[in-house]
Image (spheres, grey):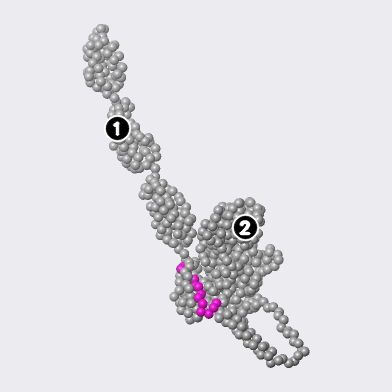
Amino acid sequence: MTTTTGDLTGARVDGRYRLERLIARGGMADVYEARDERLDRTVAVKMITAAGTDAFDLKAFAHEARTIARLSHPNVVAVFDQGVHEGLPYVVMEYVPGTTLRDLLNRRRRLRIEEAVELCAQVLDGLQAAHDAGLVHRDVKPENILLKNGGRGDRVKVVDFGLAEAVHGDRDTGGPLVATAAYVAPELVSGEPAQASSDVYSTAILLYELLTGEVPFDGPDAGAVARRHVEEDVPSPRDKAPDVPEGLAELVQAAASRRPGSRPVDAGAFLRRLQAIDVRPAPGTTGQVPRPTRAVQTTMVVEHERTKRSWKALVTLGLIAAVLVAVAAAGWWIGVGRYTAAPSLLDQTRDSVGAYAEDAGFEVDLVDAYSESVPVGEVVSQDPGVGERIRKGATITVVVSLGPERYRVPDVLGMTEEEARTALAPFTDEVDVVRDYSTEYKAGEVMATDPPVNEEVKAGTAVTLTVSDGHPPLRVPDTVGMTEEDAVAALDEAGLEVGEVTERTSDTIDEGLVIEQDPVPDTPVGPDDPVNLVVSSGPELVLVPDVVGLDIKEATEELEALGFEVKTAQIWFTGTVFDQSVNGGERAEKGAEIWLWAR
């Protein structure tokens, strides 16, 4: 195990992220508040300080970070960048000013019922975005839930999707179990791979804690606590908090079933069932969360030496009492009286929420946002949250669903690769390129996309571009020995054009047949490359000399020197040629037979 614990405050990562302050330190990573000097914004940089030298896979870590970066949801901490600094992997994330849910629980122990339900709903909304992208969080707990502005309002941000598994290895490949014993799903304890229903279980345990102020299974021995998830059913939260509505308690137990198949299939299914629950306190209870109390001294020491006060003292005391009452009344109004609890607008729509809030004495500010789980036009969340402290007549920010975030793959056919990447940039930078030959598109032009043009996809969806390498290469057929007409037909069938056709004599190839071609057979060529042909004009014709009157021997030598085959016939022995079978001045094929007669 390689571990680095030094404080890197002041370091400059990747030439742009200046680490300004160490804000959190854990066994696996350190988190810094940092300044992105290139974009002039505050970010959080998480340095992975512990990575197993055998199990750590930098390529897998980078892939996991890129996958998480594609998540775009208001309840998920955004991941902007990733890399390696001095051997330490890091991710650059959205900086969320505020606190964690664990800090809030440490202060308040448990939350009001409607407050717990609303907070859990936002956690589930963020988890569903991950489940839709094929990600499982694996470690849902209060420490991994950030509350923007320290819990004043309901903006919830879920952090640390899957990065622990990316560092330590997945459970089904023999890596260690990376989860918190109090919230771990039983199938993970048993060595089974994580699934969406594993996050459902952990979120149910989280909701149990929000409602009761404690987790169902706890103790100093993490191993023993983890085994209890496998061996025991989660009890009803009503056992600890009788004000919890029966329906809500039953949903918590169903979502925390030991059998994954008995739970809601994913965070979205859990969220829909949670939103259908009546969150009013159980009959016979107040629904008020008990607050810690502290003892105060109420005994006053009274002097008995004087039993009478002067009228001036009484007037003074009266004036002081009046002032105190006035101050108390003003303080009550400033601190309490002008405030009320925010109403629930979560079951409203874009068309109804304004009038509904106005009837309740509030204004609304509508903000559009995409949601994978809330239908178009319905309310996703509100700020301040349900039951939160709000000034009477104030404005409530309402996030209205635009439905799932989808983009149409643009028509990039015929564009260059660079032009296509620019057209795809509004929704993805995950662009792969493959190349193939095309008879329709020129070299360098995009000829196909996957997903295809006009198909609707999520933000961050990888797109594969098929780019043309031009016309497929053609191979020249063998035309030697063919007639010129047949050779032209063979080249045309192969998609090639005939170039220059010339003639040449040949002693071996008959007249009219192809002697030679350029390029030679089986050469790869393009469709515009011409093929030149050489056609035989037959054997070479030679001018026959006139040898009449010459000595037969001399005449024979002269004709044979020209390549003719000479036959002779002598009448007398003197040997003077008086006739020849091919007259002098005529032309004959080289190698032709010529008769000479001598006397």
Q: Based on the displayed image, in which of its 4 quarters is residue 146 positioned?
A: bottom right
Tell me which numbered mark, 1 or 2, is placed earlier along the sequence: 2
The amino acid sitting under disc 2 is: Thr
Instruction: Give above or below for 552 relative to 234.
Output: above
Residue 281 is covered by the magenta coloring: no
Q: Position of residue 336 (x, y in %)?
A: 58, 80
| Residue bearing the label numbered 1 | 502
519 or 367: nearer the eye? 367
The amino acid sitting under disc 1 is: Thr
Q: Based on the displayed image, in which of its 4 quarters is residue 60 positioned?
A: bottom right
Q: Describe the element under mark 1 as helix, strand or loop.
A: strand
Residue 400 is covered by the magenta coloring: yes
Assign the C terminus to one quadrant of the image.
Answer: top left
Q: Position of residue 105 (x, y in %)?
A: 63, 71
Q: Residue at x 25, y 11 (%)?
A: 550
Compared across the picture, whether 42 is left or right of 320 comes to left
Q: Describe the element under mark 2 as helix, strand or loop.
A: loop
| Residue bearing the label numbered 2 | 9
